[in-house]
Amino acid sequence: MKLPDMWVNVTWSDLPLNLENARQVAAVVTAFTLPLTTTGENVAVAVFAVLALMTFDLPRLVATLRSPAGYLPVALFALLLVGVLWSMQPYSVAISWVIPYCKLLLIPLVIATALTPRQALQIAAGFLAACVILLALSWVSLRWPSGPWHWFKSSGVPVKDNAVQSDCFALCAFGLAIGAARIWSAGGRGRALAMDILALLFLGDIFFIYLSKTGMIVAAAYIHDNAGHAVLPGGGCIGRRGQ
């Protein structure tokens, strides 16, 4: 059986690049599964973590761990482990309660991963694609309440729960709004308008389809935090940073 040329010509020198490409695919899949499925997310995160460890840059990781964003998650996880010593439960049971917080260790690992702006946009696009699927299902179920929605977690919420969905939708809405402002200032009026409409649909789902206190708080926080990033036509800014 003859192997394809792409496999025959692979050498050890190609391994780092192939691992980085695989890491990027795992990152995009992780972002896509985040709003949809906990099991898929856990599998994708595990694959990404392994590939990130195989491709990390040691000086960059050391520099990350010296910054508050790098060492505080590690310190918090270490504090949780120390807290196990005071548990009245057997250590095997107490440790099982700490395992979900291993995700804290992903924070410095992701920061230390050398992602290009293009790769970051690809990851964001994967997350947005999954949220658009949920958004479409949520709005369709509102317009067609007698449809085959028996598998929904609750009204307007296909998977996971309302708090998670609202958080994801708020993140998409304000990411789209900031992107639309920048594209508008660069002359892409049509694309900016389409992004704004999609952002409004995300916000409408939060506030009208299934009112979520968590989503409202997150939305208000994004508005406050990102007010200084709004870009006016011509390159000017509004908000605190533009004063």
Image: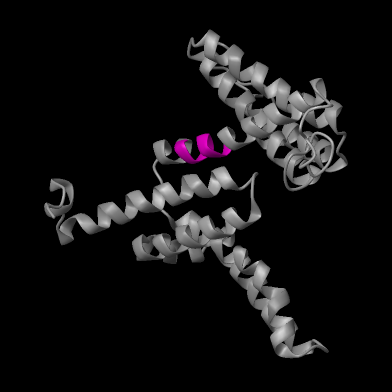
Residue plotted at (74% across, 46% down): 164
Q: Nearer the viewer, residue 28 or 58?
A: 28
- Horizontal placement of 149 versus 114: left or right? right
Q: Relative to residue 79, is residue 242 depicted above or below? A: above
Q: Name which quarter of the figure residue 242 lies in.
A: top right
Residue plotted at (63% across, 72% down): 75
- x, y percentage for residue 207? 84, 29
The quadrant in which the C terminus is found is: top right
Please tell me whether the stretch drawn in magenta is mainly helix, strand or loop: helix
Q: Relative to residue 68, is residue 146 depicted above or below? A: above
Q: Is residue 23 rendered magenta in the image?
A: no
Residue plotted at (41% across, 65% down): 53
- x, y percentage for residue 103? 61, 63
- Horizontal placement of 225 versus 102: left or right? right
Residue plotted at (61% across, 21% down): 237
Report the span colored magenta: 122-127
Q: Nearer the viewer, residue 196 or 42?
A: 42
* Residue 227 is at least partly visible in this image: no
* Residue 100 is at least partly visible in this image: yes
